[in-house]
Amino acid sequence: MRLPYDVTAFDIKGKNHYCAHLLDLTNREILGISVSRINNTDLVYRTLEKAISKRDDLSKYIHHTDSDVRYCSSKYVKLVEKSQMKISMCRGNAYENAHSESFNKTLKRQEINIHQYLHRRSRKKYS
């Protein structure tokens, strides 16, 4: 069972924001999602914590990410290991993480591009 993870950027009133999500491919459920103005380890760590709080046992899952530095930090790797997930990383090919890329496209088309967020408070439900 795979849990692909990705971060995508979007714009609110000319300022970049980043949405991190962890997707359960067995049922297409978003286990964790967070939004931040800063694309860093704290963003992906917070999202992973949310996913872990939703599932008691993640030991049968493969945690699949791209090979970004955020996912390689010792703090983040320790949390993945504590949850007993197996770690898998892309080798630079976006097609390896196609499910997450597809979710990003859907999120941008159906939510972000349709709703004009006037300020950060409008998207707080994801933080």
Image: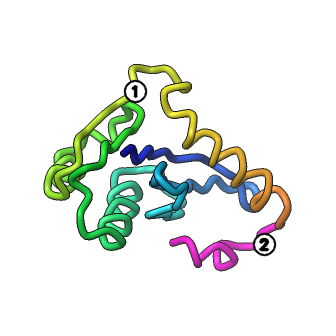
Residues drawn in magenta: 116-127
Q: Which residue is mark 2?
A: 118
Query: Relative to 86, is 24 on the left or the right?
Result: right
Q: Residues within 10 Å of mark 1 (few under 14, many from 20)?
A: some
Task: Report the Cα–Cα distance between label 1 and label 2.
Answer: 35 Å
- Report x, y in % for residue 38: 48, 55
Q: Is residue 20 magenta?
A: no
The quarter in which the N terminus is drawn is top left
Q: Amino acid at mark 1?
A: Cys
Q: Position of residue 82 (x, y in %)?
A: 14, 57
Residue 120 is inside the magenta segment: yes
Residue at 15%, 50% in the rendered image:
81
Q: Is residue 120 above or below residue 91?
A: below
Report the residue at 55% width, 25% height from top. Answer: 95
Q: Position of residue 79 (x, y in %)?
A: 20, 56
Q: Residue at x 34, y 31 (%)?
A: 89
Q: Of the residues shown, which amino acid type is indicated by label 2? A: Leu
Q: Which mark is residue 90?
A: 1
Locate residue 117: give its quadrant: bottom right
Which numbered disc flags the more N-terminal residue, 1 or 2? 1
